[in-house]
Amino acid sequence: MTLHLLGAGASKGLVTDLQAGFTAETGIDVATYFNAVGAIRDKFLAAEPCDVVILSAALLDDLAARGLLLTGSIAPIGTVRTGVAVPAGHPAPAIATGDNLRAALLASRGIYVPDLQGSTAGVHVMRVLRALGIDQTIAPYLRPFPNGAIAMKHLAAAAEENPIGLTQITEIKYSPGLTLLGPLPEAHGLSTLYAAAVAARTAQPDAALALVALLTGPGSRDLRAASGFES
């Protein structure tokens, strides 16, 4: 038996850490696909094989309103803040205030970000750049990728002057070769609640519910916290 999970990129580290144990305990394999939330929503709506879906709580509420999720199956995983990273071993610029962040971004010749239209963090990053008044100035140095995981992989190997990356903290934490500087300054911060749910079209509701319970229950609380999810 195989469960199919479609997940927001922010959940990749957590799912990866838990899926082998789930399979060992239940005998059920988990086939996963992760991407920006917009891409995951579109894949789900296109009726791709899916038993469990992880998205922002707001997007899951929309799917539930359409009757596409198993009633009562939505369970919160936790909130994730958008953060800032640099390649390991590189100087760590200050980012505690908006002015700090603005200076760090203006000094960079490689700003690594997820999809600026389809990802939670990417959409927010564009809002921040506009609020800081530097969206046009730094446009030539933006390095967008389909999702945060891919952006952070490239950031770790970046060769530009003062490379920097912005995405969900969970994606930074599970990407090797990076230093997490911290969340965005409070005035420009974003906390996103992610949740898991069972697709109404699943043929394996009991197994899917068991996987959601593992991802969101007390047994994985410490792992969620270590991955970057906050209560």
Image: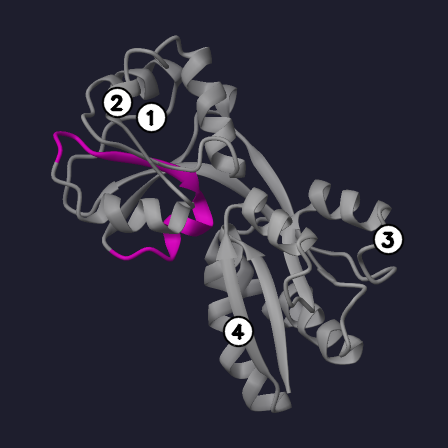
Q: Are marks 3 and 2 in contact (CB under 8 Å)?
A: no
Find numbered disc 1 in the image and state the secondary structure of the residue it sits on. loop
Read off the magenta span.
Answer: 160-176
Q: Nearer the viewer, residue 228 or 36?
A: 36
Q: Which mark is residue 95?
A: 1
Closer to the chain start, of discs 2 and 1, is 1
Asked whether, in this view, residue 28 is left or right of residue 67, the answer is left
Question: Disc 3 versus disc 4: distance between alpha carbons?
Answer: 28 Å
Whether residue 111 sits left or right of residue 215 in the image: it is left
Q: Residue, x 42% and y 50% (percent of image)?
A: 171
Q: Which residue is mark 3?
A: 67
Q: Does residue 88 appear in this view?
A: yes
In the rendered structure, are the residues bearing label 3 and label 4 in contact, judged by CB atoms less than 8 Å apart? Answer: no
| Residue appearing at x 82%, y 50% in the figure | 64
Marks counted in the figure total 4
Residue 104: which numbered mark, if any?
2
* Residue assigned mark 4: 18
Mark 1 in CB contact with mark 3 (< 8 angstroms): no
Between marks 3 and 2 in the image, the one whose residue lies nearer the viewer: 3
Q: Secondary structure at mark 3?
A: loop
Of the image marks 2 and 4, the number of the one nearer the N terminus: 4
